[in-house]
Image (tube, rainbow, N blue to C red):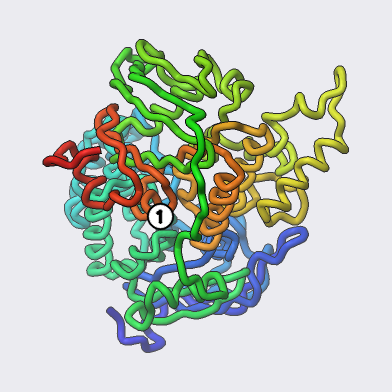
Amino acid sequence: MTDGTDNNIILDFQNITKRFPGVTALKDVSLQIRRGEIHGLCGENGAGKSTLMKILSGVYPAGTYEGTVLYEGHELRLEKGAIRQATEEGIATVYQELTLIPAMTVGENVYLGKEPVEHGIINWDKMYADTRELLKKYNLDIRPQDVVKFLGVGKMQMTEIAKALSENAQVLILDEPTSALTEAEIDKLMDILHTLRSHGVTCIYITHKLEEFFRIADTITVLRDGAVITSQPTENLTREKLVHYMVGREMTERFPTGHHTPGEVVFEVEDLHAQDPDSSRAVIKGVTFDVRQGEIFGIAGLMGSGRTELVMTIFGEYGKITQGEIRLEGQKLHSRSSHEAMLSGISLVPEDRKRHGLVLMQSVLKNISLANLPQFSNWFSIDDNAELKASLQFANSLSIKAPNLNVPVDSLSGGNQQKVVISKWLMSQPKVLILDDPTRGVDVGAKYEIYKLMNDLAEHGMAIIMISSELEEVLGMSDRVMVMCEGRSNGILDIEEATQEKIMALATNIANGVTA
């Protein structure tokens, strides 16, 4: 911890304003970050967090924004080759999407592009020795010769951190570092951050998981609509205060109350078995459940339990079904592709929106209408007016924040990107809507909007299947919960009897008498 004197200020953002066509992303932002602290940067998607960090890391070089950034007491002007210049200054970023080369070893990734060379030849012994020393210094539990593609996500992230630290980073930006980690891996990351702090490394920590700020951050700054709302020691804040600062209003409940009245069974899965299409390994091993009209049916389970594999198989995009049946409104389905599943009345909002849900270079308009073009086709052409009218209707009903529908979808915040994916599949008018981790990487305000939308859809009779990695979300939104373990459905609980303890007991296969 630092004493707060001026000598301890490593970063001083002074009156930073950043404009894009049609939107001001940062408005006169002034913020100080102390040397050797873990500084939490908090805010809804679109609040300006990433834009501010892109200025610091050189993605947006000097001259593209107004204001001044002081680093170690001197003006930081990142110009040509700005990203590399930022790294040389000791400012490094660990992104949510890792940037490693899977076929290379840990050591090769850490020193990629800066390998020790003697007489024109890479000195492999020195490279691995230096990597070993770096890993030991920061208590990173990986081996220099490990091939990255064989590591778990947690150890890949350690490699990414080691890569940043090999540049003698004094400031380390961590953007959603725990989004794909298990609880054990998160615990290890927290230990690593404590070690970095003890070595004087300043960490700027960005996450939508508010509890992590209270676990690790010394100071929290909240941005809203591109402006600093508050910056104060974590010990002065509570979760409720933080949410109020983020959304600008009191949120008395995390999960809006739904008034679902489940009706007749509309969707059934009976004794479903499926194999991985590449290895013939069994991934679904006898799953049985049904979903009623107007019901939110939750699916819980640990990472690797088969949740995503199950819904991707139902959607015709993953496993080879070897046994069992899928029925919609009593009719057996044989979906061999997402297109066939959609025509049958099933839509899926995927877990990874950027890889499987969006065409990032395309406009918001084209992404919303992409799966529904036959609705607007007239012989060999698209009725542009009808396409625009329908897309606008969904954009407005889901409150998608964008200057217009022609901007690239990758220019939107994560929450708004997720709303675009949901809009696309709602436009297909599904009978069953599957949502795989629908609020992953989404801020607290956008989460609440998605929850309200789910309740509204259920109240109007839609059958919804929701996978979630967050037990509180499963318990807060579901009418019933199926718990998966090792590719099997281990039990189905009515929400009145479901608890975190019962779900975890079923998810870990130690139910000890818990019955479905």
Residue 396 at x, y percent in the picture: 73, 52
Whether residue 454 is visible here, answered yes or no, is: yes
Whether residue 82 is visible here, answered yes or no, is: no
Q: Identify the secondary structure beneath mark 1.
A: helix
Q: Residue at x 77, y 52 (%)?
A: 404
Above or below: residue 367 compared with residue 395: above
Nearest to the observer: residue 503 or residue 396 = 503
Residue 257 at x, y percent in the picture: 49, 59
Q: Could you tell whether 274 is left or right of 71 in the image?
A: left
Q: Residue at x 44, y 29 (%)?
A: 311
Q: Residue at x 19, y 47 (%)?
A: 141
Asked where in the image residue 514 lies, by quadrant, the reply is top left
Q: Could you tell whether 25 is left or right of 39 in the image?
A: right
Report the quarter where the N terminus lies.
bottom left
The residue to which callout 1 is attached is 476
Asked where in the image residue 2 lies, by quadrant, the reply is bottom left
Furthest-bottom residue in this view: 5
Q: Could you tell whether 83 is left or right of 287 in the image?
A: right
Callout 1 crowding tier (Cα within 10 Å): few <14, some 14–19, many ≥20: some
Above or below: residue 12 compared with residue 280: below
Amino acid type, residue under disc 1 in the picture: Gly
Above or below: residue 414 compared with residue 224: above
Furthest-left residue in this view: 512
Q: Residue at x 55, y 32 (%)?
A: 432
Nearest to the observer: residue 98 or residue 423 = 423
Nearest to the observer: residue 187 or residue 118 = 187
Report the quarter where the C terminus lies.
top left
Residue 306 at x, y percent in the picture: 33, 30
